[in-house]
Amino acid sequence: MRAHLLTCEGCSREWRRVSNAAAPDGGAADRGLLAGILAGIESWESAPSRTEDVKARVGSAIASFLGPHATDELLGAVSAQGDNLFSTLEPVVALFLGCRAASALVDHLVARSIPRAL
Amino acid sequence: MGRFGATAIRLHRTLLNSAVGCSWVIIAVTAAYLVCGAMAFVAWRITADDAWVTEFFQVPAALAMLWLSATQFWLAGQAAYHFAAGEPMRRVWTWITLSAACGLAGTVSTQIFAVKSPLNPLMLLPAWRTDSALAVWHEAGSIIGGTLQFAFLACGLRLAVRVYRQAGFLGRLKWSDRALLIAFAAYLVAVVYDVAVAFRAGKPWRWSEAAVWPVDPLLWLLLLQALLLYRSVKRMGPGWIGRCWKTLSFAVFLTALGDVGTWAFNYGYLPYPWSAVVWYVWLPAAAAYALAPAYQLEAIHRATGSFPRG
């Protein structure tokens, strides 16, 4: 293998990359980034207030179309994690405004509400 | 051909966008007409010259009714176009567009061709100036703009009620709604009684009159549907979607009110000259019919972002 690595440029480059990542100080930047992402996910999942914040933002925007009572009723059916938020609201909006308009509205709300809550 | 196609697409988009945000124009024009109508009414009462009111209804009010009917037809067609084939609201707005087309034809027939006014181009032809010719236009307009218009509207509203039920937000009638429906049913009985008395007194049978008889039962059905839609909107709370259906419910309510008022006027139940107030009901009713699709379009355009979302 050593003899092959001496002659093959592609394999020797790959070997150096793997060796650096396995080294105690190699790939520290990547691991730091990964740890940050994992911490962010954990923090997001353990913070119900953020889910509530997104639900409130989306609910407020949807209420201007459906009405506040209907929106409250629909949000009551959304899980605590909010994972079915848009799948609960979009079909009802689509019934009244059409799929094209409902889809555009949900795209807008996803783009506007979630980054603000992060 | 390519340039022609591109121009046609641009024109189509411009017309589509022109339909957006026109609700305030409809409200402003109707309000201006009502103010003018009120002034004509006051002038009639002060001068004792009824030409103030008759001329107001023959020319400016007839033009306003024509414009509002055409606007309703145009906007309802646009609303239907914005839904994809197979979507429930596409069918709702298609029926309402058909109803609006009949309303427009009825308005042209009864407000323009059936009246001896400067707006009637048929007055240039001697054969069409006779009272019998004008009566034919009036009867045709009453059938198209009455029975047919309300039948198509009832089909549309039935589907709209179904959409509210499908969404899980169908409202329930209150006791006041039931009382209103019972009162209108009593009015239907009174109309049937009047017709029966007229026939017993020797009134000849005419198909053109019989073709208009379904108008009142259809209005009862429309009133029921409108009340259901109104209660559904109240259940959902104020919003862009509800505004459309609440306005359409209001239009149906005004139509029913105008119908009862016209009957009361014809049979002498309303004292003169205050019975003339009934004539003013049709303008806001026509405006409400035109506003409903305008609000539907505004809701769609707000959702897609082509109109400020607010």
Image (cartoon, coloured by chain):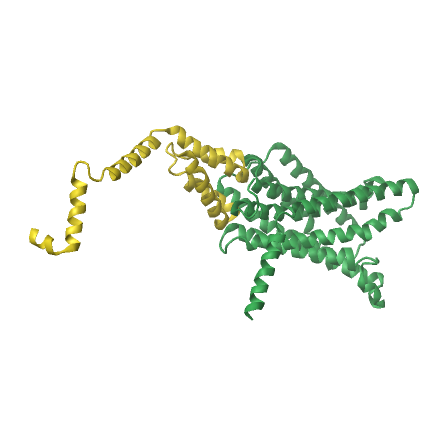
Residue A93 visible from this viewpoint: yes
Total marks shown come to: 0
Residue ID at (25%, 40%): A30
Left or right: residue B248 versus residue A24 is: right
Res B229 → quadrant: top right
Relative to the observer, which residue lies in front, B232 or B67? B67
Q: Is residue B100 above or below residue A106?
A: below
Residue B201 visible from this viewpoint: no
Chain coloured yellow in the rendered structure: A
Residue ID at (61%, 49%): B20
Specify the colour of chain B.
green
Residue A67 percent across, percent down from the top left = 54, 36
Residue B134 percent across, percent down from the top left = 81, 60
Residue B34 percent across, percent down from the top left = 77, 43
Quarter of the rendering occupied by the N terminus of chain B: bottom right
Residue B48 percent across, percent down from the top left = 92, 43
Left or right: residue A29 versus residue B254 is: left
